[in-house]
Amino acid sequence: MTAQEILNKAKSGGYALGAFNAGNVELVRAVVEAAKNQQAPVIIETSSREAQHFGMKNFLEVVDGFSQGTGLPILSNLDHGSGLEECQLAIKAGYNLVHFDGSELPYGENLKITKTIVDQAHQKGLLVEGEIDKILGSSAPHQEDAESVQASGNYTDPEKAADFVNQTGVDILAVFVGNLHGTYPQPPKLDLERLKIIVEKLPCFLSLHGGSGLSEEDIKQAIAIGKIVKINVNTELRVAYKETLENVLKGSEEVAIYKIMPPVIAAVQKVVEEKIQLFGSANKAVAPREEVSTTQP
Ligand SMILES: [Zn+2]
C-alpha cells in the first residue's frame, strides 16, 4: 500500500496512526515491536535534530531492517523539517513523508517553499505535511501552566488554512488548536469547535502534534471529528527511555549494552502500544485481500 492509501484507510476507518519519534536504534526497535504486537500501521519519524544525530540514511535502513518480514504498513517521516534543503535531503534519502515547518516564516515565504517541496515530493510519490501556525512547546516535560503557553500563540485560522492547502497542495496540515508539544501539570484543552470548522473547510488530511500531553478524552474526540490520521508522540517515549535507563544503571556494575537496553526498549514499547490502542489503530494492519476474505459470506 502507498502512504496515500494507508492514510485514506485510516480516515475512512476513523482511526489515526501514531507518529513516533525515534532518534536511535533502540527507539526504532521499540516502535516496530509495538506495531507487531498490536498489528498496527505506524509512522516512525525523526525530527531535524534526531535526523542529524542518527543520519537520515542510517535511520531509513534501520527502519527497513526491523520492518522486514513484519508485513506491516510502516511509514517514515521527517518531523518539523527546518528548510528547503533539509526537506530535499529527506526526499532524496527516501522518507515516505516530509513535514516542512515554515510556521515561523512570513506567510508568503512559507507558502512558496512548501509548494516547491510539494512539487518535488509528489514527483516521487511522497506526501508532504505543512504548518502555518506554530505548535508551541517542546518535546519535554514542562512545569508551566498549559493555558499560559496556549495564550502566547495563534490557533490555526480555518480560512487561512484553506488558502494555504489550496495554494500549496499539501497532503497533511499540522493544526494548532491548543495542542502543545510536551507534557504539562494539567493536559492542554483542545479547541474542538475550531477543529470541526477546519475539518469541514479542508480537503486534506490533518495531523495532531503534542500527542504526549493531551487527555485521552480530547484525543478520542479529535479523531472522531475526522481527517486526523497522524498523531505525533515524542516526549513520553523520551521520558520512558531516560527513566528506565537511569533505573537500570543505578547501582549496577553491568557494562554489556545488550543487557542494559532490553528493559529500556520494553518501557518505550509499552508507551507506544498504549498510544496505538488509544488512537484506534490496533489490528488495522490487515492486508486488503484478507479483509475482503473475512467480509465474504
Ligand atoms: Zn511537532
Image (cartoon, grey):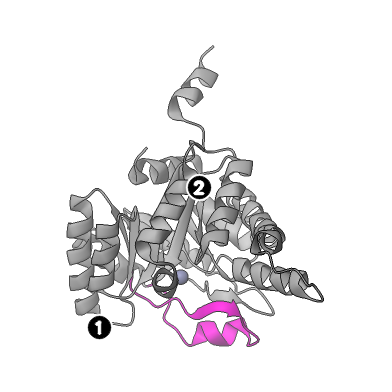
- In x, y percent, where is residue 222? 53, 58
Q: Is residue 129 left or right of residue 255?
A: left
- In x, y percent, where is residue 191? 52, 69
Q: CA distance from mark 2 to mark 1?
A: 40 Å
- In x, y percent, where is residue 7? 41, 46
- Would you call the spot at circle 1 few (<14 residues within 10 Å), some (14-19), or many (20 or more)? few
Q: Of 207 and 234, which appears nearest the observer?
A: 234
Q: Earlier in the sequence, mark 2 or mark 1?
A: 2
Label 2 beta carbon less than 8 Å to ligand 1: no
Tag shown at residue 229: none
Q: Please, what is the three-letter code of the amino acid marked with disc 2?
A: Phe
In what element is the residue under mark 1?
Answer: loop
Q: Is residue 154 magenta?
A: yes
Mark 2 vs mark 1: in front: 2
Q: Is residue 150 magenta?
A: yes
Specify the segment rendered in magenta. 130-156
Q: Residue at x 75, y 68 (%)?
A: 254
Whether residue 280 appears in this view of the structure is no
Q: Of 196 and 33, which appears nearest the observer?
A: 33
Location of the N terminus (image quadrant): top left
Q: Residue at x 42, y 59 (%)?
A: 59
Tag shown at residue 66: 2
Seen from this angle, which residue lies furthest right?
A: 251
Q: Is residue 114 left or right of residue 29?
A: left
In what element is the residue under mark 2?
Answer: helix
- Would you call the spot at circle 2 few (<14 residues within 10 Å), some (14-19), or many (20 or more)? some
Q: Please, what is the three-letter code of the amino acid marked with disc 1?
A: Pro
